Structures are given as C-alpha cells and as structure tokens.
Image (tube, rainbow, N blue to C red):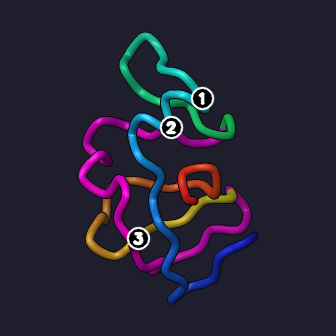
Amino acid sequence: MRYEVGDKPKVKSWDKLIAQYGLDEEGWVDVDGSVSFIPEMKKYCEKTVTIKEVNPEESYYFIEGDDYCAYSEGMFE
C-alpha cells in the first residue's frame, strides 16, 4: 500500500474523479473496483487529509474527520 498512518495525501477533485472513473447509476464514482466515492465525501475534494487507519487486506484507508467512508489510492492525487 502506498500510504501509511500519518501520511497526508490530497483528495482529487470531484470533476477529476468523474473524468477518470465516471459516475454509476446511483451518482457514485466507482474507483479501483474496491470502494466508491460517494457524494457525502465531496467535502474532502481538493483537501489534504491525514490517514488515520490502513486496511491492507482490503486495500483501503480511513481519514481523520470521516469515520464512515473508506478511501482507496485512486481517490488521492
């Protein structure tokens, strides 16, 4: 996995995510086939975030301030 706890990646813009991955029928962006970027996550777009937890088995991350959504490497710049 590319990031470790404490790393500070930047979340891609909503437009960049849509351009790269497209929208599904629910209005979500299916990134990397593992997790979806949902509209509730848009508030983190173009912001630098801090990785607070890494799940290497499932290849996703949790960030500080968001205890609900999982993020994948494809969501970061």
At numbered mark 1, what does the secondary structure look like: helix, strand or loop? Answer: helix
Left or right of 25 in this view: 75? right
| Marker count (numbered) | 3
Disc 1 crowd, CA 10 A, few/some/many (<14, 14-19, 20+)? some
Tell me, yes or no, whether the two marked residues, 2 and 1, touch with CB atoms within 8 Å: yes
Specify whether residue 18 is painted magenta: no
Disc 3 crowd, CA 10 A, few/some/many (<14, 14-19, 20+)? many
Q: Residue 17: which disc?
A: 2
Question: In the rendered structure, which disc, 1 or 3, sits on the residue that comes first in sequence?
Answer: 1
Specify whether residue 44 is painted magenta: yes
Q: Residue 63: which disc?
A: 3
Q: Amino acid at mark 1?
A: Tyr
Nearer to us in this view, 35 or 22: 22
Q: Which residues are magenta?
A: 34-58
User: Residue drawn at (49%, 80%), measured in percent from left and top?
Assistant: 8
- Which dot, 1 or 3, sits closer to the camera? 1
Distance Cα–Cα, label 2 vs label 1: 6 Å
User: Residue drawn at (42%, 79%), measured in percent from left and top?
Assistant: 50
Left or right of 44 in this view: 35? right
At numbered mark 3, what does the secondary structure look like: helix, strand or loop? Answer: strand
Residue 43's place in the image compared with 14, above or below, is below
Q: Which residue is mark 1?
A: 21
Tell me, yes or no, whether the two marked residues, 3 and 2, touch with CB atoms within 8 Å: no
User: Horizontal and vertical percent for residue 66?
Assistant: 30, 64
User: Residue drawn at (37%, 20%), measured in percent from left and top?
Assistant: 27
Q: Amino acid at mark 2?
A: Leu
